[in-house]
Amino acid sequence: MTPHIEAGKGDYAETVLLPGDPERARWMAETFLDAPRCVNRRRGALGFTGRFRGKPVSIQATGIGASSFLIYAHELLDYHGVKTLIRTGTCGGLSEDAPLRGIVISSEVRAEGATSGQVFGLYRPAGPDRALHALALQRAADLGIACSAGLTICSDVFHHPDGRARFDEPRALGALAVDMETSALYRISAHFGARALSLLTVVDHIVTDEETDYSERQALFTDMARLALEVAAGS
């Protein structure tokens, strides 16, 4: 048991999928895992453990933003001995190469926010485990799931007074998308010597002004969840 997770040692698998939304965690567990059991309810951050293709897999909600994400990732890695973290999150599209409802695999992330930026350097890059990244691309091809792989940006701010202008520099760098957790994922995983990968579904688009409705999002996450679980089972 840790300050934010009520589960005991052994309740989590060595591979954990990390959605932000607790309801997405519940949906993923109930839809895809065999014999899922809830291992965490503390603060409403639901966590589940079950099996996928015979392999133990856990799913833990992390909340919104890097600060919340780091709390759960740290406790999973430090106390629960987790070895692999796969983010299954949402993002905003910054490029036509990352269309609305598409999946982005973060091949590299640069942080503009205080949580990662002030500690590790503004726009200093970090990346995923390369074997997981390659496996995700292969599994996506096998499943016929279209993905875009490339640079993503991580921000601490969702509602920003500068609006679209704040993304001029990231777009000039060729960034595909922006989220709020991937930099924290890659950096803390490197710190603990763990493997990490970030898979993101584009739910709104900064360039085209398109957006999805929250009510349709669970259906949108089916391909991302399948891909993440196939990577988990094959790693």
Image (cartoon, rainbow, N blue to C red):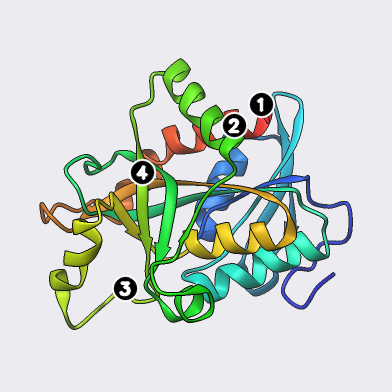
Residue occupied by mark 3: 158
Instruction: Kindly identify the amino acid type of the residue bearing the numbered disc 1.
Output: Gly
Disc assigned to residue 234 = 1
Disc nearer the start of the sequence (3/4) = 4
Q: Are marks 1 and 2 in contact (CB under 8 Å)?
A: yes
In whole angstroms, how far apart are the C-alphas of marks 3 and 1?
Answer: 34 Å
Question: Is residue 193 in sight in this rendering?
Answer: yes
Question: Is residue 36 in sight in this rendering?
Answer: no
In the image, taking residue 219 as reference, residue 5 lies left or right, namely right
Disc assigned to residue 231 = 2
Closer to the eye: label 3 or 4: 4
User: Image quadrant for the C terminus?
Assistant: top right
Closer to the eye: label 1 or 4: 4
Residue 90 vertical placement versus 161 (above, below): above
Q: Secondary structure at mark 1?
A: helix
Q: Could you tell me which residue is drawn at 77 percent across and 52 percent down? A: 82
Disc nearer the start of the sequence (2/3) = 3
Q: Position of residue 169 (x, y in %)?
A: 21, 66
Crowding at dot 2, Cα within 10 Å, few <14 / some 14-19 / many 20+, comes out as many
Q: Position of residue 80 (x, y in %)?
A: 82, 59
